[in-house]
Amino acid sequence: MTVVAVVVTVLLAAGTALTMIRILRGPSVLDRIVATDVLLAIVVVAVACVAAFSRDATALPILAVLSILGFTGSVSVARFATRQAGAADSAPEAGHSLEEGSR
């Protein structure tokens, strides 16, 4: 059982390190937001592994709250990103007015 705990810890640490690199390097804000969501998922998995390893169910409410927080954050970012993309697509081209486009 100790070998499994060590392997899981190493894998979670590697995932956290790679996610932190993506958060720090970017290149865009959307990449950083997605990496933050992945980091939250890694934290949820880590708390679940600790709860499973210790056979203690007191962490389940924490897991539920973190999962709801991650889902809400992901949906909010997705809606924000689609609104920004829609606003950029519907903007008139430079040098053209709306009246010229309707002729």
Image (cartoon, rainbow, N blue to C red):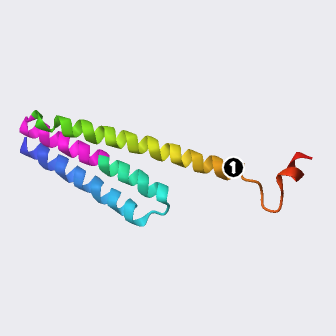
Main SS, magenta region, reads helix
Q: Which residue is at 57% across, 45% downward?
A: 82
Which residue is disc 1 drawn over?
Answer: 89
Q: Position of residue 28 (x, y in %)?
A: 50, 61
Q: Nearer the viewer, residue 18 or 95?
A: 95
Q: Which residue is at 58% across, 46% downward?
A: 83
Please check the rendered image and state whether residue 94 is part of the magenta-colored stretch, yes or no: no
In the displayed structure, 75 sits above or below 91; it is: above
Q: Residue furthest right?
A: 103
Instruction: Examine the image and state in which quarter residue 65 appears.
Output: top left
Q: Position of residue 84 (x, y in %)?
A: 59, 50
Q: What secondary structure is marked by label 1?
A: helix
Residue stretch rendered in magenta on the structure: 41-56
> Within 10 Å of the Cα at label 1, are there few (<14), some (14-19), or many (20+) other Cα atoms?
few
Q: Position of residue 50 (x, y in %)?
A: 13, 43
Q: Nearer the viewer, residue 103 or 54?
A: 103
Q: Residue furthest bottom?
A: 25
